[in-house]
């Protein structure tokens, strides 16, 4: 067999999978059949200039979802469009906006994108379309890089203002009087990549949008809102929580696609009993090589910048000396210059670039055309992100391939062992909680700064007055004799709030590696001891930084960029005190509860773990004060009678083991990072006087994960039990209940505990666990 | 379990319950101070304003209450004698039309930002009625009175007014515009706006420690303030009134604002009497005239610039004490500026005389003068040998300064390049002259071509 010859995608896949080393790793394969395009004629009301522009682009009719969306928007509805990658989503909002400008040049629109790069990309696309239509359009990007003279012209005359939530929060809304021309004529607000607004960021952005709509109504406008989201489990709920409006969902995809082969590969364990596994990189590289040598356009997703570099170096090494298309394989990640990125993007569209290795920087809607093959080196963390990355391959006509190579981590292993989960389960839900008091109060200050509050005014769902009274105690806000609440302080409240963290007090992360020290981000105080302790490896935009010094009193962490082969994980000594149960319900052998808790944690040591295999490379001590977190939690109480005969150490290991499985499943179910939740197990809770497992939200006030876990407790318990049952290890491994020493087997007891609480006693499960 | 904790909370729908939120808020209140910076700790609760807040304010600041439908405004009036002739201002290179009513304005605010949450609570204004300057202050008794407050400002600003402010172009006027927009009203139209801050920077900053209005006033108009309230303390005085009803501390704010407004009148007077009117130049600080000359020159008014420099150079060195102890007059710089003007007008002889004067001032001024002479001789007079001599003079001065421990990196770099190039040119010309002397006259043509060719090559290493 020659190493390097063109071959069709389907044959290449068969040849690759036939390799004995690969064949043994196939966990699942499935073919998704081809889909025909569902077309609708152009709407009759569309301006002829726009119609001509589309025809010139080769678009004679709309896909059904585009037609449905533009008609609904035309009818005055707020719409959320949910379709896969590269299905022509941006036309769903660009058409109504351009039509509005055709009908009335005074009309204005505001576009929000989660990142600057996307904003640039989409405003270029919008301008191209307007130019094709011979339409005079003033569309401008307003972000941190916009020069001052251009800023004032965008304020005065920008018909379409493209920005991001952070700019809206800190630069536009507090200065809304300078933007009155925009707000007085605002017809549309476009929120693209809506699924990115979840967790803390989403909770903040929902409040920024409340402020935006409040300003609009001050200027007498009620803009329609158009959201676009990747496929997630609850697009309507997400868009409605985010905007406070009821939304029409458009999710029947009318874009065509060729047949797609999806393969899940799980590298064979090195040691089955202890569950020691190789990482995802080796097999990912082999897959990419097979397709690149066959001349198929391939994208490889690595989970971190360093993974991307390792893959790229490996591929280049293997392709050297005429063994493959070396020069046509490129890397793509945060930190590349915009011009480099643009060159790679256009190279991918033209076919000149054959292979690209990328972080998730390419996951969000940047246009690179459609490729033959997507290789995912490791589970991206959520079903939604998995489909987004897999969606990068997919020809309109031809067969395409998506390969997921599972890594060694617990979530990866769960997915590899339950591949049906990827296909059959609805994708995860994006959670956010605009009512998080920490977040809400921060934005209420900004909102008062922007406009005084009437005494009976609502902010979101609820009346604002009692919260304003609370702010009044601080002295920043006061109620005047007319009953209205006014901002009465020298402070500029928006500058005290970062949309990326929950509480106002943060540790600022300063990169000292460049010519001048530069702030690259912040972490909230509670997470600081585990994320930026001295010698920690801190990840920012998929880039690794080493923490040289943490100045706790000044709240500053000094870091410099490095390329290390490991990451760090801190261990916490945590005590938890429940403050109030918001809701409680019985289970057959215990209770499920959702409530507010106080968590005190002390970081003790950190471990250095190898990036790919999570192998332990060493450890160090952390010397930092205890921190307190006031947050929400879900917890599981165990009826003491059921475990009366258990030894205390046995019960302890069972609780921790069950807790680890629950934590894994919780992060799978809720589309959250495993680090967003913390685990505490108490053999005898001083408050409940019984064994309890707590999962608490690692963000002050929480972002709505805990109430959702409360609602989905049954599913959580069942899947955690499945996870333990189906793990091939003998008595516990990092992929299920955690590693064990040989004599004690938390695997059996943890599974028994879960069964006890949920009341399911499936004999098959117990025999499997015993055997 | 946790029965005592679960009281009153039966299901998740209760999350939306207001009582629950209040309980959580109460807990947050207890917990927050531990994680909040001291600067944000809670202050005493606001004391309710008495119904007669406006009256109390008026009594405290010596004003009267103007009651309108939209609310109350407290008005303070004063007259100050400031004889002033606006007509000469028309000659100045600044945007001002003295035939319009000049309307002086200065605000006191609750902060330095111009975001929607910063409030102007005191607007001081003034206009001339003959020799008398009428000063009117509008005070905002409370937030809800803002509509009346802005309306009254609108009635006081004449339709064709020319606004005069200090930093008002970037601060006071945009802030007031914001307040009007916030109340969905149009700001009063203006015929024009003269911001004195950039003018004072250009004319007076050379002899003042900073460009604050109080510093400019003492250095330029010779008015010393005593017990003036620092501007940074102004917002807290007003919050003290809003929150605790403390009216007395606002007296100092009244005086601060009054003085600022009157200061602007004095500054306009200085501009008119000493700078705009050439007859007044004799009473001006010569350094101010040098600054004015530069503004004229930037606007292409070279003759006016030269007239200012003439006046400045004709004045004796000012005594420091008479001008508030400021910096001395840099006469050499005036000569350099004058020479540059002459040179650009093609008056080479006059320029050389001025450079000669500058060179006699010594120090860096002399170095600059010699370098300027070198440029002039090389490029205008086509005299590389003369230019080399001038550059060498500059180099000798720089070397002397270096030996005294003064390093001038800019001059060293410039002179290094200049001397190398000039020496090459002079040597080349010498060679050509030598060759021309020995060759047959018939060879003159190709030789010229060769010389031109080499000549253009010479420029390359020089660049």
Image: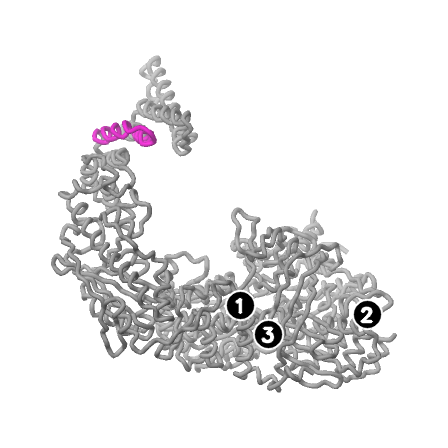
The prevailing secondary structure element of the residues shown in magenta is: helix
Q: Is residue B221 above or below residue A698?
A: above
Between A204 and A765, the residue placed more toward the observer is A204
Between A552 and A521, the residue placed more toward the observer is A552
Is B352 part of what is drawn in magenta?
Answer: yes
* Residue at the spot of label 1: B33
Between A172 and B39, the residue placed more toward the observer is B39
Q: How far apart are the alpha carbons under marks 1 and 2?
A: 50 Å
Q: Is residue A492 left or right of residue B109?
A: right
* Residue at the spot of label 3: A430
Q: Position of residue A149 (x, y in %)?
A: 37, 57
Magenta range is B349-373
Where residue A126 sits, quadrant-wise, is: bottom left
Q: Earlier in the sequence, mark 2 or mark 3?
A: 3
Between A195 and B75, the residue placed more toward the observer is B75
Q: Chain of mark 2?
A: A
Q: Is residue A433 left or right of residue A302?
A: left
Q: Secondary structure at mark 1?
A: helix
Q: Chain of mark 3?
A: A
How many residues crowd around disc 2 within 10 Å: few (fewer than 14), some, or many (20 or more)?
A: some
* Residue at the spot of label 2: A728
Q: How far apart are the alpha carbons under marks 2 and 3?
A: 31 Å
């Amino acid at each position: 067999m020659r190493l390097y010859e063109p071959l069709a995608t389907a044959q290449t896949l068969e040849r690759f999978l036939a390799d004995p080393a690969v064949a043994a790793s196939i966990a699942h394969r499935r073919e998704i059949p081809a889909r025909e395009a569902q077309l609708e004629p152009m709407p009759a009301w569309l301006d002829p200039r726009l119609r001509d522009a589309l025809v010139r682009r080769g678009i004679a009719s709309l896909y059904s979802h585009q037609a449905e969306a533009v008609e609904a928007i035309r009818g005055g509805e707020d719409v959320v469009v949910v379709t896969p990658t590269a299905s022509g989503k941006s036309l769903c909002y660009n058409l109504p906006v351009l039509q509005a400008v055709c009908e009335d040049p005074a009309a204005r629109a505001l576009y929000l994108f989660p990142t600057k790069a996307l904003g640039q990309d989409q405003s270029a696309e919008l301008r191209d379309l307007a130019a094709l239509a011979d339409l005079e359009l003033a569309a401008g990007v307003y972000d941190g890089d916009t020069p001052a003279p251009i800023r004032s012209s965008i304020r005065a005359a920008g018909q379409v203002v493209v920005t991001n939530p952070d700019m809206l929060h800190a630069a536009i809304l507090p200065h809304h009087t300078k933007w009155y021309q925009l707000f007085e004529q605002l017809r549309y607000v476009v929120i693209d990549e809506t699924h990115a607004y979840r967790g803390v960021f989403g909770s903040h952005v929902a409040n920024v949008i409340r402020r935006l709509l409040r300003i609009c109504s001050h200027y007498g406008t009620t803009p329609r809102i158009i959201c676009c989201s990747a496929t997630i489990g609850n697009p309507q709920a997400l868009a409605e929580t985010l905007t406070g409006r009821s939304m029409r969902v458009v999710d029947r995809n009318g874009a065509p696609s060729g047949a797609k082969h999806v393969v899940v590969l799980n590298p064979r364990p090195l040691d089955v009993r202890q569950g020691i596994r190789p990482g995802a990189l080796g097999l990912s590289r082999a897959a990419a090589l097979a397709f690149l040598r066959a001349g198929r356009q391939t994208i490889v997703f690595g989970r971190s910048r360093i993974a991307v570099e390792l893959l790229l170096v490996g591929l280049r090494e293997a392709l050297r000396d005429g063994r493959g298309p070396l020069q046509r394989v490129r890397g793509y990640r945060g930190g590349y210059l915009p011009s480099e990125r643009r060159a790679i993007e256009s190279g991918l569209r033209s076919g000149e670039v054959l292979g690209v290795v990328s972080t998730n920087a390419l996951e969000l809607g940047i246009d690179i055309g459609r490729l033959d093959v997507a290789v995912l080196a490791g589970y991206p963390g959520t079903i939604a992100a998995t489909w987004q990355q897999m969606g990068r391959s997919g020809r309109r006509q031809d067969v395409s391939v998506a390969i997921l190579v599972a890594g060694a981590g617990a979530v990866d292993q769960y997915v590899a062992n339950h591949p049906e989960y990827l296909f059959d389960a609805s994708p995860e839900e994006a959670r956010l909680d605009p009512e998080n008091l920490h977040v809400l109060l921060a934005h209420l200050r900004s909102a008062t700064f922007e406009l005084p509050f009437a005494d009976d005014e609502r902010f979101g769902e609820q009346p604002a007055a009692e919260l304003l009274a609370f702010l009044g105690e601080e002295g920043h806000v006061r109620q005047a004799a007319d009953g209205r609440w006014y901002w009465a302080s020298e402070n500029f409240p928006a500058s005290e709030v970062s949309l990326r963290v929950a509480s106002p007090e943060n540790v600022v992360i300063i990169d000292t590696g460049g010519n001048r020290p530069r702030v690259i981000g912040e972490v909230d105080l509670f997470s600081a001891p585990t994320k930026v302790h001295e010698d920690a490896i801190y990840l920012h935009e998929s880039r690794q930084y080493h923490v040289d010094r943490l100045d706790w009193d000044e709240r500053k962490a000094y870091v410099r960029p490095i390329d290390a082969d490991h990451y760090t994980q801190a261990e916490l000594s945590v005590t938890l005190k429940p403050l109030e149960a918001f809701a409680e319900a019985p289970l057959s052998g215990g209770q499920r509860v959702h409530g507010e808790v106080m968590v005190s944690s002390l970081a003790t040591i950190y471990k250095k773990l190898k990036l790919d295999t999570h192998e332990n490379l060493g450890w160090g001590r952390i010397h930092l004060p205890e921190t307190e977190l006031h947050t929400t939690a879900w917890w599981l109480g165990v009826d003491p009678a059921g475990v009366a005969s258990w030894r205390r150490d046995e019960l302890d290991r069972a609780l921790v083991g069950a807790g680890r499985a629950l934590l894994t499943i919780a992060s799978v179910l809720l589309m959250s990072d495993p680090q967003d939740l913390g685990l505490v197990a108490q053999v005898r809770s001083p408050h409940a006087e019984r064994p309890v497992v707590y999962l608490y939200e690692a963000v002050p006030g929480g972002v709505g994960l805990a109430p959702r876990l409360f609602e989905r407790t049954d599913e959580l318990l069942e899947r955690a039990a499945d996870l333990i049952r189906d793990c091939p290890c003998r008595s516990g491994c990092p992929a299920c209940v955690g590693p064990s020493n040989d004599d004690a087997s938390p695997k059996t007891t943890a599974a028994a505990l879960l069964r006890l609480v949920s009341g399911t006693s499936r004999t098959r499960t117990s025999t499997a666990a015993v055997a | 379990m946790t029965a005592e904790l679960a009281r009153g909370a039966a299901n998740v729908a209760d999350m939306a319950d207001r009582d629950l939120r209040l309980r959580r808020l109460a807990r947050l209140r207890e917990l927050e101070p531990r994680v909040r910076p001291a600067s944000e700790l809670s202050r005493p609760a606001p004391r309710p304003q008495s119904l007669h807040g406006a009256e109390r304010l008026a009594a405290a600041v010596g004003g009267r209450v103007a009651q309108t439908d939209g609310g109350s405004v407290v008005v303070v009036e004063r007259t100050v004698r400031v004889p002033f002739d606006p007509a000469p201002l028309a000659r100045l290179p600044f945007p001002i039309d003295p035939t319009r009513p000049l309307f002086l304005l200065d605000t006191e605010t609750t902060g330095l930002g111009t975001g929607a949450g910063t409030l102007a609570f005191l607007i001081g204004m003034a206009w001339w009625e003959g020799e008398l300057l009428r000063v009117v202050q509008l005070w905002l008794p409370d937030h809800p009175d803002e509509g009346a407050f802005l309306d009254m400002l609108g009635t006081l600003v004449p339709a064709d007014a020319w606004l005069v402010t200090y930093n008002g172009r970037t601060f006071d006027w945009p802030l007031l515009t914001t307040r009007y927009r916030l109340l969905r009203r149009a700001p009063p139209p203006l015929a024009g706006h003269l911001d004195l801050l950039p003018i004072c920077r250009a004319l007076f900053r050379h002899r003042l420690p900073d460009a604050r209005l109080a510093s400019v006033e003492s250095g330029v108009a010779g008015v010393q303030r005593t017990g003036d309230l620092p501007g940074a303390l102004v917002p807290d005085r007003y919050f003290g009134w809003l929150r605790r009803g403390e009216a007395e501390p606002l007296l100092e704010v009244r005086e601060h604002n009054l003085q600022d407004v009157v200061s602007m009148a004095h500054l306009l007077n200085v501009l008119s009497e000493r700078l705009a009117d050439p007859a007044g130049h004799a009473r001006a600080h010569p350094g101010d005239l040098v600054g004015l000359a530069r503004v004229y020159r930037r606007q292409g008014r070279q003759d006016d610039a030269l007239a200012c420099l003439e006046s400045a150079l004709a004045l004796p060195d000012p005594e420091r004490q008479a001008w508030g102890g400021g910096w001395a007059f840099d006469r050499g710089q005036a000569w350099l500026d004058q020479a540059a003007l002459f040179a650009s007008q093609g008056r080479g002889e006059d320029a050389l005389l001025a450079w000669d004067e500058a060179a006699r001032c010594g120090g860096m001024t002399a170095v600059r003068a010699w370098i300027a002479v070198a440029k002039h001789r090389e490029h205008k007079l086509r005299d590389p040998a003369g230019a080399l001599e001038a550059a060498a003079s500059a180099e000798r001065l720089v070397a002397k300064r270096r030996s005294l421990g003064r390093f001038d990196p800019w001059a060293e770099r410039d002179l290094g390049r200049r001397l190398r190039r000039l020496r090459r040119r002079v040597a080349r010309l010498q060679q050509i002259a030598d060759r021309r002397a020995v060759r047959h006259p018939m060879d003159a043509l190709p030789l010229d071509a060769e010389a031109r060719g080499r000549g253009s090559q010479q420029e390359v290493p020089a660049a």
